Amino acid sequence: MTVSGVASTASSLPPPPPPRSPATPASPGATAASGSAASDRVALSGLGGALRGDGLTAFDALSDAQRQQLADLVDSGKISGETVNDALTQRLKQARVSAMGATQRMYNNDHADLFFDEATSVDDLRGALSQTLARRSSLMDKLTAVMGEDERAAASNDLAARTMNPLLAKDRMGMSRYIMPGFFSMDFSDSRLNSTKKQGDATYSLKALGVDLDAIDKALRKTGEEDAAAILSERAGLPVSRTVAADQDYSVDDALVKPLSAPPGASPPDARDYPNPLDYGRKLREFLQASVANMRKVGELGGHTVYQIDRPDHIQRPQDLPTPSSAGAAIALGEPVDRAYMAGLATRY
Protein backbone atom coordinates (compact mmCIF):
# COMPACT_ATOMS: atom_id res chain seq x y z
CA MET A 1 0.00 0.00 0.00
CA THR A 2 1.36 3.43 -0.87
CA VAL A 3 0.45 6.91 0.24
CA SER A 4 0.18 9.35 -2.65
CA GLY A 5 0.55 13.05 -2.01
CA VAL A 6 2.40 16.13 -3.10
CA ALA A 7 6.03 16.35 -2.07
CA SER A 8 7.97 19.57 -1.82
CA THR A 9 8.98 20.89 -5.24
CA ALA A 10 10.86 23.92 -4.01
CA SER A 11 14.17 22.70 -5.47
CA SER A 12 12.73 22.48 -8.97
CA LEU A 13 10.93 25.80 -8.95
CA PRO A 14 12.27 29.21 -9.96
CA PRO A 15 13.16 31.51 -7.06
CA PRO A 16 10.00 32.85 -5.40
CA PRO A 17 9.17 36.54 -5.49
CA PRO A 18 10.35 38.65 -2.57
CA PRO A 19 8.31 38.18 0.63
CA ARG A 20 5.33 40.44 0.89
CA SER A 21 5.83 42.98 3.60
CA PRO A 22 4.13 46.27 4.33
CA ALA A 23 6.01 49.37 3.34
CA THR A 24 8.14 50.88 6.06
CA PRO A 25 6.90 54.39 6.91
CA ALA A 26 9.28 57.32 6.84
CA SER A 27 8.33 58.42 10.34
CA PRO A 28 9.07 56.37 13.50
CA GLY A 29 5.43 55.32 13.56
CA ALA A 30 3.75 52.97 11.12
CA THR A 31 1.06 54.57 9.01
CA ALA A 32 -2.02 52.86 7.66
CA ALA A 33 -4.12 54.36 4.86
CA SER A 34 -2.44 57.35 3.28
CA GLY A 35 -4.26 60.60 3.87
CA SER A 36 -6.39 59.22 6.70
CA ALA A 37 -6.59 61.48 9.74
CA ALA A 38 -6.91 58.44 11.99
CA SER A 39 -3.79 56.90 10.44
CA ASP A 40 -1.83 60.12 10.90
CA ARG A 41 -2.68 60.14 14.57
CA VAL A 42 -1.66 56.48 14.93
CA ALA A 43 1.70 57.21 13.30
CA LEU A 44 2.45 59.68 16.07
CA SER A 45 1.11 57.52 18.87
CA GLY A 46 2.81 54.92 21.03
CA LEU A 47 1.31 52.21 18.82
CA GLY A 48 2.83 53.31 15.52
CA GLY A 49 6.41 52.46 16.41
CA ALA A 50 5.50 49.01 17.74
CA LEU A 51 3.73 47.72 14.64
CA ARG A 52 5.74 45.45 12.33
CA GLY A 53 5.46 42.32 10.20
CA ASP A 54 2.12 40.52 10.49
CA GLY A 55 0.97 42.99 13.14
CA LEU A 56 1.31 45.89 10.71
CA THR A 57 -0.27 43.89 7.88
CA ALA A 58 -3.26 43.15 10.11
CA PHE A 59 -3.47 46.77 11.28
CA ASP A 60 -3.59 47.94 7.65
CA ALA A 61 -6.66 45.74 7.06
CA LEU A 62 -8.67 47.33 9.88
CA SER A 63 -11.08 50.25 9.60
CA ASP A 64 -10.08 53.74 10.71
CA ALA A 65 -12.32 53.35 13.76
CA GLN A 66 -10.66 50.07 14.75
CA ARG A 67 -7.19 51.53 14.29
CA GLN A 68 -8.03 54.58 16.37
CA GLN A 69 -9.50 52.44 19.16
CA LEU A 70 -6.25 50.50 19.43
CA ALA A 71 -4.14 53.67 19.33
CA ASP A 72 -6.27 55.26 22.05
CA LEU A 73 -5.87 52.20 24.28
CA VAL A 74 -2.11 52.40 23.92
CA ASP A 75 -2.00 56.15 24.52
CA SER A 76 -4.12 55.72 27.64
CA GLY A 77 -1.57 53.31 29.09
CA LYS A 78 -4.10 50.46 29.33
CA ILE A 79 -2.05 48.26 27.00
CA SER A 80 1.34 48.47 25.34
CA GLY A 81 1.95 48.85 21.62
CA GLU A 82 3.96 45.60 21.72
CA THR A 83 0.98 43.72 23.12
CA VAL A 84 -1.31 45.10 20.43
CA ASN A 85 1.20 44.06 17.76
CA ASP A 86 1.37 40.54 19.22
CA ALA A 87 -2.42 40.26 19.35
CA LEU A 88 -2.87 41.40 15.75
CA THR A 89 -0.16 38.98 14.66
CA GLN A 90 -1.99 36.13 16.38
CA ARG A 91 -5.33 37.04 14.77
CA LEU A 92 -3.80 37.13 11.29
CA LYS A 93 -2.17 33.73 11.81
CA GLN A 94 -5.50 32.37 13.02
CA ALA A 95 -7.20 33.79 9.93
CA ARG A 96 -4.72 31.86 7.77
CA VAL A 97 -5.26 28.62 9.68
CA SER A 98 -9.05 28.95 9.46
CA ALA A 99 -8.89 29.71 5.74
CA MET A 100 -6.65 26.69 5.14
CA GLY A 101 -9.06 24.43 7.01
CA ALA A 102 -12.02 25.73 5.01
CA THR A 103 -10.05 25.33 1.78
CA GLN A 104 -9.32 21.71 2.64
CA ARG A 105 -13.01 21.04 3.32
CA MET A 106 -14.00 22.60 0.00
CA TYR A 107 -11.26 20.69 -1.83
CA ASN A 108 -12.38 17.39 -0.33
CA ASN A 109 -16.04 18.05 -1.10
CA ASP A 110 -15.53 19.25 -4.66
CA HIS A 111 -12.97 16.60 -5.61
CA ALA A 112 -14.03 13.62 -3.50
CA ASP A 113 -13.87 11.32 -6.52
CA LEU A 114 -10.09 11.73 -6.68
CA PHE A 115 -9.71 9.92 -3.35
CA PHE A 116 -11.40 6.80 -4.75
CA ASP A 117 -9.63 6.61 -8.11
CA GLU A 118 -6.37 4.68 -7.85
CA ALA A 119 -5.22 6.29 -11.11
CA THR A 120 -5.19 9.73 -9.45
CA SER A 121 -1.84 11.42 -10.00
CA VAL A 122 0.03 14.20 -8.25
CA ASP A 123 -0.85 16.47 -11.16
CA ASP A 124 -4.54 15.63 -10.64
CA LEU A 125 -4.29 16.63 -6.98
CA ARG A 126 -2.41 19.80 -7.85
CA GLY A 127 -4.90 20.72 -10.58
CA ALA A 128 -7.81 20.20 -8.18
CA LEU A 129 -6.16 22.57 -5.70
CA SER A 130 -5.79 25.20 -8.41
CA GLN A 131 -9.52 24.93 -9.18
CA THR A 132 -10.44 25.16 -5.49
CA LEU A 133 -8.29 28.24 -4.94
CA ALA A 134 -9.83 29.92 -8.00
CA ARG A 135 -13.32 29.18 -6.72
CA ARG A 136 -12.51 30.57 -3.28
CA SER A 137 -11.01 33.72 -4.78
CA SER A 138 -14.21 34.30 -6.76
CA LEU A 139 -16.37 33.76 -3.67
CA MET A 140 -14.24 36.14 -1.62
CA ASP A 141 -14.60 38.79 -4.32
CA LYS A 142 -18.37 38.38 -4.07
CA LEU A 143 -18.22 38.59 -0.29
CA THR A 144 -16.35 41.88 -0.35
CA ALA A 145 -18.47 43.38 -3.16
CA VAL A 146 -21.58 45.44 -2.60
CA MET A 147 -24.47 42.97 -2.42
CA GLY A 148 -27.51 42.05 -0.37
CA GLU A 149 -27.24 40.36 3.02
CA ASP A 150 -28.70 37.10 1.66
CA GLU A 151 -26.08 36.97 -1.09
CA ARG A 152 -23.30 37.73 1.37
CA ALA A 153 -24.52 35.00 3.71
CA ALA A 154 -24.63 32.50 0.84
CA ALA A 155 -21.08 33.36 -0.24
CA SER A 156 -19.86 33.11 3.35
CA ASN A 157 -21.49 29.70 3.80
CA ASP A 158 -19.96 28.46 0.56
CA LEU A 159 -16.53 29.60 1.74
CA ALA A 160 -16.96 27.79 5.07
CA ALA A 161 -17.71 24.52 3.18
CA ARG A 162 -19.09 22.75 6.24
CA THR A 163 -21.50 20.40 4.43
CA MET A 164 -19.57 17.19 3.75
CA ASN A 165 -19.85 15.34 0.46
CA PRO A 166 -21.42 11.94 1.36
CA LEU A 167 -18.89 10.21 -0.89
CA LEU A 168 -16.17 11.03 1.62
CA ALA A 169 -17.76 8.63 4.12
CA LYS A 170 -17.25 5.72 1.74
CA ASP A 171 -14.92 2.93 2.90
CA ARG A 172 -11.48 2.97 1.24
CA MET A 173 -10.16 -0.17 2.92
CA GLY A 174 -9.99 -2.21 -0.29
CA MET A 175 -7.84 0.25 -2.19
CA SER A 176 -4.18 -0.53 -2.84
CA ARG A 177 -3.30 3.18 -2.85
CA TYR A 178 -4.43 5.64 -0.23
CA ILE A 179 -4.83 8.99 -1.98
CA MET A 180 -3.92 11.82 0.37
CA PRO A 181 -2.80 15.30 -0.77
CA GLY A 182 0.05 16.45 1.41
CA PHE A 183 -0.26 20.19 1.02
CA PHE A 184 -2.97 20.56 3.69
CA SER A 185 -0.88 19.12 6.53
CA MET A 186 -0.72 21.50 9.50
CA ASP A 187 2.95 22.33 9.97
CA PHE A 188 3.41 23.50 13.54
CA SER A 189 6.98 24.53 12.79
CA ASP A 190 5.68 27.14 10.32
CA SER A 191 5.80 30.53 12.05
CA ARG A 192 3.29 31.91 9.55
CA LEU A 193 0.62 29.63 11.02
CA ASN A 194 1.59 28.72 14.58
CA SER A 195 1.34 31.39 17.26
CA THR A 196 3.33 31.79 20.45
CA LYS A 197 1.96 31.88 23.96
CA LYS A 198 3.05 35.53 24.17
CA GLN A 199 0.88 36.29 21.14
CA GLY A 200 -2.02 34.28 22.55
CA ASP A 201 -1.81 36.10 25.89
CA ALA A 202 -1.84 39.40 24.01
CA THR A 203 -5.09 38.43 22.29
CA TYR A 204 -6.71 37.76 25.65
CA SER A 205 -5.43 41.08 26.95
CA LEU A 206 -7.03 42.88 24.02
CA LYS A 207 -10.30 41.06 24.58
CA ALA A 208 -10.26 41.96 28.28
CA LEU A 209 -10.28 45.64 27.30
CA GLY A 210 -13.49 45.20 25.33
CA VAL A 211 -11.99 45.07 21.83
CA ASP A 212 -14.32 43.22 19.46
CA LEU A 213 -12.18 40.33 18.20
CA ASP A 214 -14.95 39.07 15.92
CA ALA A 215 -14.90 42.42 14.10
CA ILE A 216 -11.12 42.22 13.77
CA ASP A 217 -11.39 38.66 12.44
CA LYS A 218 -13.97 39.80 9.90
CA ALA A 219 -11.61 42.54 8.72
CA LEU A 220 -8.76 40.03 8.38
CA ARG A 221 -10.73 37.35 6.55
CA LYS A 222 -9.72 38.40 3.04
CA THR A 223 -6.05 38.73 3.96
CA GLY A 224 -6.18 35.33 5.67
CA GLU A 225 -7.67 33.78 2.53
CA GLU A 226 -5.05 35.31 0.27
CA ASP A 227 -2.22 34.27 2.57
CA ALA A 228 -3.56 30.72 2.90
CA ALA A 229 -3.82 30.44 -0.90
CA ALA A 230 -0.22 31.62 -1.26
CA ILE A 231 1.06 29.11 1.32
CA LEU A 232 -0.87 26.22 -0.24
CA SER A 233 0.31 27.16 -3.75
CA GLU A 234 3.87 27.26 -2.47
CA ARG A 235 3.52 23.79 -0.96
CA ALA A 236 1.92 22.29 -4.07
CA GLY A 237 4.33 23.83 -6.54
CA LEU A 238 1.67 26.03 -8.16
CA PRO A 239 2.56 29.46 -9.53
CA VAL A 240 2.64 32.07 -6.79
CA SER A 241 2.38 35.84 -7.14
CA ARG A 242 3.85 36.46 -3.70
CA THR A 243 5.17 34.71 -0.63
CA VAL A 244 4.08 35.15 2.98
CA ALA A 245 7.03 36.13 5.13
CA ALA A 246 7.98 34.22 8.27
CA ASP A 247 7.35 35.74 11.70
CA GLN A 248 10.72 37.12 12.77
CA ASP A 249 9.59 37.28 16.41
CA TYR A 250 8.54 33.61 16.53
CA SER A 251 10.16 31.31 19.08
CA VAL A 252 9.53 27.56 18.95
CA ASP A 253 10.23 27.44 22.69
CA ASP A 254 7.14 29.59 23.25
CA ALA A 255 5.00 27.96 20.54
CA LEU A 256 1.36 27.31 21.40
CA VAL A 257 1.58 23.89 19.76
CA LYS A 258 5.01 22.27 19.77
CA PRO A 259 6.10 20.50 16.55
CA LEU A 260 6.43 16.73 16.85
CA SER A 261 10.02 15.55 17.03
CA ALA A 262 11.16 11.97 16.53
CA PRO A 263 13.54 10.21 18.92
CA PRO A 264 17.20 10.16 17.77
CA GLY A 265 17.63 7.73 14.89
CA ALA A 266 13.89 7.07 14.54
CA SER A 267 11.90 7.48 11.34
CA PRO A 268 8.18 7.17 10.60
CA PRO A 269 6.92 3.88 9.13
CA ASP A 270 6.53 3.59 5.37
CA ALA A 271 2.97 2.73 4.34
CA ARG A 272 4.32 0.59 1.47
CA ASP A 273 5.74 -1.86 4.01
CA TYR A 274 2.28 -2.62 5.42
CA PRO A 275 -0.26 -4.20 3.02
CA ASN A 276 -2.86 -4.02 5.78
CA PRO A 277 -3.63 -0.33 6.50
CA LEU A 278 -4.60 -1.23 10.06
CA ASP A 279 -1.05 -2.47 10.69
CA TYR A 280 0.33 0.74 9.24
CA GLY A 281 -1.98 2.80 11.43
CA ARG A 282 -0.84 0.92 14.53
CA LYS A 283 2.84 1.40 13.69
CA LEU A 284 2.29 5.08 12.98
CA ARG A 285 0.58 5.56 16.34
CA GLU A 286 3.45 3.80 18.09
CA PHE A 287 5.93 6.09 16.34
CA LEU A 288 4.02 9.23 17.30
CA GLN A 289 3.64 8.08 20.90
CA ALA A 290 7.38 7.48 21.10
CA SER A 291 8.11 10.90 19.63
CA VAL A 292 6.91 12.86 22.65
CA ALA A 293 6.55 12.20 26.35
CA ASN A 294 2.98 13.42 26.59
CA MET A 295 0.67 14.14 23.68
CA ARG A 296 -3.08 14.52 23.77
CA LYS A 297 -5.84 15.98 21.66
CA VAL A 298 -6.94 19.41 22.84
CA GLY A 299 -9.43 20.40 20.16
CA GLU A 300 -9.89 21.65 16.62
CA LEU A 301 -8.46 24.75 14.99
CA GLY A 302 -9.48 25.66 11.47
CA GLY A 303 -10.62 22.11 10.74
CA HIS A 304 -7.39 20.55 12.01
CA THR A 305 -7.05 18.28 15.03
CA VAL A 306 -4.66 19.87 17.50
CA TYR A 307 -2.43 17.81 19.80
CA GLN A 308 -0.79 19.48 22.75
CA ILE A 309 2.60 18.33 23.97
CA ASP A 310 2.69 18.96 27.69
CA ARG A 311 5.51 20.59 29.53
CA PRO A 312 5.57 22.25 32.97
CA ASP A 313 3.70 25.55 33.17
CA HIS A 314 2.92 25.54 29.44
CA ILE A 315 -0.17 27.31 28.14
CA GLN A 316 -1.59 28.34 31.46
CA ARG A 317 -4.07 31.18 31.15
CA PRO A 318 -3.01 34.23 33.18
CA GLN A 319 -5.25 34.65 36.20
CA ASP A 320 -6.12 38.25 35.38
CA LEU A 321 -7.54 37.42 31.96
CA PRO A 322 -11.25 36.64 31.45
CA THR A 323 -12.39 33.11 30.73
CA PRO A 324 -13.57 32.81 27.10
CA SER A 325 -17.35 32.51 27.29
CA SER A 326 -17.44 29.53 24.92
CA ALA A 327 -15.11 27.57 27.19
CA GLY A 328 -16.54 28.60 30.55
CA ALA A 329 -18.52 25.40 30.99
CA ALA A 330 -15.49 23.27 30.17
CA ILE A 331 -13.42 24.95 32.86
CA ALA A 332 -16.23 24.60 35.40
CA LEU A 333 -16.22 20.86 34.73
CA GLY A 334 -12.54 20.66 35.55
CA GLU A 335 -11.19 20.15 32.02
CA PRO A 336 -7.62 21.35 31.30
CA VAL A 337 -7.28 25.12 31.13
CA ASP A 338 -5.09 24.91 28.04
CA ARG A 339 -7.95 23.44 26.00
CA ALA A 340 -10.16 26.38 26.93
CA TYR A 341 -7.28 28.72 26.17
CA MET A 342 -6.94 27.32 22.65
CA ALA A 343 -10.70 27.36 22.07
CA GLY A 344 -10.80 31.02 23.05
CA LEU A 345 -8.33 31.85 20.28
CA ALA A 346 -10.30 30.09 17.53
CA THR A 347 -11.78 32.19 14.75
CA ARG A 348 -15.48 32.12 13.95
CA TYR A 349 -15.28 31.25 10.27
Image (cartoon, rainbow, N blue to C red):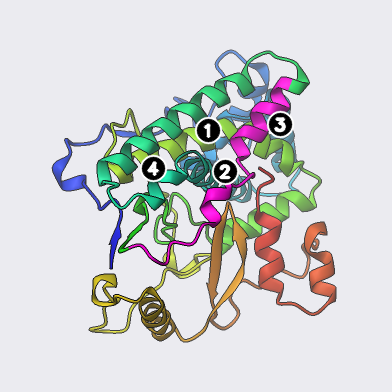
Label 2 vs 4, first from the N-terminus: 2
Q: Give the SS element for disc 1.
A: helix
- Inspect the magenta stretch and tell me whether residue 153 lies in it: yes
Kindly identify which residue carries mark 4: 232
Looking at the rendered structure, which numbered label has been put on residue 95? Answer: 2
- Mark 3 or 2, which is nearer the eye? 2
- Quadrant assignment, res 284: bottom left
Q: Which amino acid does the dot numbered 4 rest on?
A: Leu
- Inspect the magenta stretch and tell me whether residue 219 lies in it: no
Kindly identify which residue carries mark 1: 223
Q: Give the SS element for disc 2.
A: helix
Q: Which residues are magenta?
A: 151-175
Q: Position of residue 2 (x, y in %)?
A: 27, 64
Label 3 vs 2, first from the N-terminus: 3
Q: Which amino acid does the dot numbered 1 rest on?
A: Thr
Q: Which amino acid does the dot numbered 2 rest on?
A: Ala
CA gap, disc 3 and disc 2: 17 Å
Kindly identify which residue carries mark 3: 66
Q: Give the SS element for disc 3.
A: helix
Residue name at image x 55 percent, y 80 percent: 310
